[in-house]
Amino acid sequence: MKRVKRILVVSVLLLITAMALCDTFGIITYDEMMVFLRLRRPAFTSAELSVHFIDVGQGDSTLIISGDRTVLIDAGDREGGQSVRSYLVSQNVDHLDYLIATHPHSDHTGGIEMVLESFETGAVLIPHFSESGKSEEDLYAWHELNRTAEAAGITMTEVSPGMTFDLGISSLSVLAPSSDYDEINNYSVVTELVHGENTFLITGDAETESEADMLKNGVLEDIDVLRTGHHGSSTSTGSEFLEIVKPEYAVISCGAGNSYNHPSGSVMKRLGEYGVRVFRTDLQGSVIAESDGKTICFITADKEQAEK
């Protein structure tokens, strides 16, 4: 036991000496050493951008922190709303400049009531939505969203392609929807977040029909990070779409052991064929992407995986 203690003490002294020498001669800093030893995760300055793909189970919620500006895209289902609230509090979020409800499905909008009750919110953004031919279930979710916003004293604003929102050090542009659809998922508000040289595409549940319209309208470009459509379902993330956006990373938001078998094996295979690195909330919990405008660093909930 004494021998082990001596080895431990000597090792610590050597480590401290090495860090001091390295810091003095500019080889490696103390902070970099802590990151290397996994005693501290890599991080950029507090003024930079972070995108949080929040684990809400079988649902969807994405938080953007851009300097002092905040955007929440969807808030999971009713149960997920509490998780979203707790997560925002853990990130010291005390207000939302924008809350985007991508489309009226309960696994995206059910938690919005909890969020609006808990945080001062500047504006709620929604897609143009035609009630014609929609099911009672779809219309119920839509009317609930309207009721929730009205109860919070907030007027919802319809967005359209071409609209851009200034987030200080970054910008958020609307790419879709651009038409009326039979399938509710295709009404999803699709947004592109740009920070310096880094680009994120957040797609809600947009399916291949909406992807085809974006391709036709010429609004898609090379991106760094794709939040895949419809929880990794086979109805989204088509080959033609991937051929244009060419993401380096993809994040799939889905629940562990979900009954829909999300993500689809065909989508996982397709992403693999395009060399896309995939993060999944069902396997890794909440996923954070940090950007300094040139480099993106990923951190998972357990902080065991990080990549620059």
Image (spheres, grey):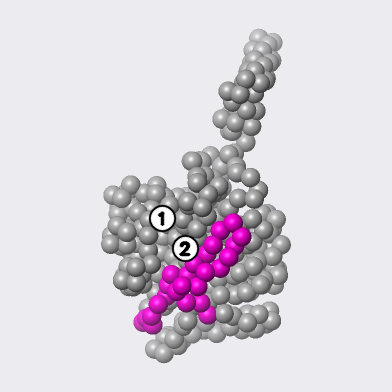
Whichever of callouts 1 and 2 sits on the residue coming sooner in the sequence is 2
- 235 displayed left or right of 82: left
Residue 286 horizontal/vertical position (percent): 54, 53
Q: CA distance from mark 1 to mark 2?
A: 9 Å
In the rendered image, which residue does mark 2 sit on? 192
Residue 27 sits above or below residue 307 on the image: above
For image coordinates 49% across by 67% down, the residue present is 173
Amino acid type, residue under disc 2 in the picture? Glu
In the rendered image, which residue does mark 1 sit on? 223
SS at circle 2: strand
For image coordinates 43% across by 52% down, the residue present is 224
Instruction: Characterize the local packing of mark 2: few (<14), some (14-19) or many (20 or more) Cα atoms within 10 angstroms.
Output: many
Task: Check whether the beta carbons of the residues at disc 1 and disc 2 lie within 8 A of each other.
Answer: yes
Amino acid type, residue under disc 1 in the picture? Ile
Q: Is residue 159 magenta?
A: yes
- 150 displayed left or right of 295: right
Q: From the image, which quarter does the N terminus lie in?
A: top right
Q: Nearer the viewer, residue 53 or 163?
A: 163
Q: Is residue 26 magenta?
A: no
Q: Nearer the viewer, residue 140 or 246?
A: 246
